Image: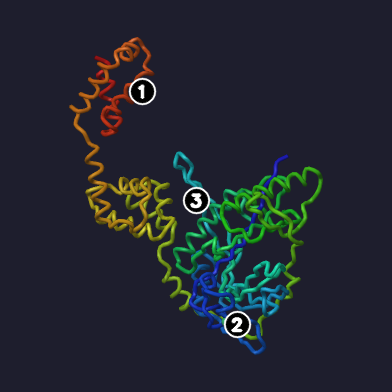
Amino acid sequence: MKYTTIVGMEIHVELKTTSKMFCGCKNDPFHAPKPNMYTCPVCLGMPGGLPVPNKKAIEWTIMLAQALHCQIAAISKFDRKNYFYPDLAKGYQISQYDQPIGEHGQITIRTVDTPGTVQEKTIRIRRVHLEEDTGKLQHATIDGKKVSLVDFNRSGVPLVEIVTEADIRSGEEAKAFLKELHKIVRYLGISDANMEQGSMRLEPNISVKQATTDSEDGLIDEKDFPPYKVEVKNINSFNYVKKAIEYETKRHIELLEQGELPQQETRGWNEHKNETFSQRRKENANDYRYFPDPDIPPLRFSSTMLEKIRNSIDELPQEKSQRFVATYRISVPQAEFLTEDLAMTEYIEDVWKQAGSRLTPTVIANWIINKKIAAQSVSPDELIQAIITATTVEEISDETIQQAIGKVLSEQPKAVSDYKSGKTGVMMFLLGMTIKELKGKGDKSKIQEQLASSLRV
Ligand SMILES: [Zn+2]
């Protein structure tokens, strides 16, 4: 039996605004010297605390939604998502329900295989909305007693949620998608998107169905989705997402083969055992009793405002990668690698421009990639000089090569006679000896050519 894995992603990204989403408290939970330092009546949910939305956070969410090719709502609003948890002081989270800031976007993922063929696939973005983060629970043992502590430094930090359509078909695709989204967020400069610190958190929704023929565009109609899905919560690495999807796929197939339907539930990821574990039954949206937040008026975005934000978006990773290939004639894998980090793209463009005709962009790109040069670790000029010096030293004259070949051939009469009697395989041995004699200098194909012509004599 053939099966298809169906995955949609939910990604939470903390915005690095100066202050929190609905109050003036400092937004820097990860570096706070003590728990509960950056708090006030608003983010502690005290009576009388009134939320005032953070303009920068709204602009940045619009910017991200635009970069993901979303339609931006003319009118958007905040809603209350009601549930109880000790890290949620108010008893509800301010989020967005039916009028998110952005909808109907997409990301194109590009994978390059070994021969250098570029494969493209589009993952649709269902929505991009803005909400507030919760506090953080810590479980500890104090005086021999097991206790749970709560830290509200993170309570009310602006949090963007990005939800995809269920267009992802494998762990590998999920990883490629997440890497691209991560790059975009970092290029926009709106979040550290640091997974270890929890400023980017990943949740795949996974189900498996018996394979039928997909429509031509590879999309599966929502009505043909399996009647269940499993959400794996708060994963903090692209690799773990990939592994969790692969683990769940296998688990679901085993159940389906036994005629059972996997449970609709929320699961956690155990990174030590490389497996998921059951946490709780999954809730439905209507369990949260969403309703518009009466304290916050609806948001209206003028076309002038949207245009201004759109114009502030600089070149995004894929545009940059394509321009590097077109302008500097480097290969697609080189461009993909070099555009992973914005600081690197700025650095290498400086080096390329300053090198002028002294070095080709490909030589520079190879050097930076192979020697693992970090952006700005040496000045462009020093780097150019270093590459020129290194490549000049390695050039050696034909006479030197000839001398080395002569020496090797006279020292290896058996190999020479073997070669002449038809055992051409010894050529590689003689080439190795010659390269050793030349201490690794010189162009290898040129040495091989001269060696071959010497042997023909
Ligand atoms: Zn506050």
> In the rendered structure, which amino acid carries the disc numbered 3?
Arg
Question: Label 2's element?
Answer: loop
| Nearer the observer, 290 or 45 | 45
Q: Nearer the viewer, residue 6 or 172?
A: 172
Q: In front: 422, or 408?
A: 408
Q: Secondary structure at mark 3?
A: strand
Q: Where is the C terminus found, in terms of image quarters?
A: top left
Upstream in sequence: badge 3 or badge 1: 3
Numbered badge on residue 428: 1
Callout 1 environment at 10 Å: few (<14), some (14 to 19), or many (20+)? few
Mark 2 or 1, closer to the camera: 1
Q: Eyeballing the image, is 88 above or below 429?
A: below
Is ligand 1 less than 8 Å from the beta carbon at label 3?
A: no
**Front in this rendered view, residue 332 or 427:** 427
- Looking at the rendered structure, which numbered label has been put on residue 110? 3
Q: Nearer the viewer, mark 3 or mark 1?
A: 1
Mark 2 → mark 3, Cα distance in angstroms: 38 Å
Labels 2 and 1 touching (C-beta < 8 A): no
Q: Which label belongs to residue 298? A: 2
User: Identity of the amino acid at label 2?
Assistant: Pro
Q: How far from the left and from the top, in percent, is residue 15?
A: 52, 71
Crowding at mark 2 (Cα within 10 Å: few <14, some 14-19, many 20+):
some
Say if 245 sits above or below 159 in the image.
above
| Residue sitting at x 61%, y 78% | 77
Label located before the other in sequence (2 or 3): 3
Number of labels in the image equals 3
Q: Marks 3 and 1, Cα distance to the nearest angstrom?
A: 38 Å
Q: Position of residue 74 (x, y in %)?
A: 56, 77
Element class at badge 1: helix
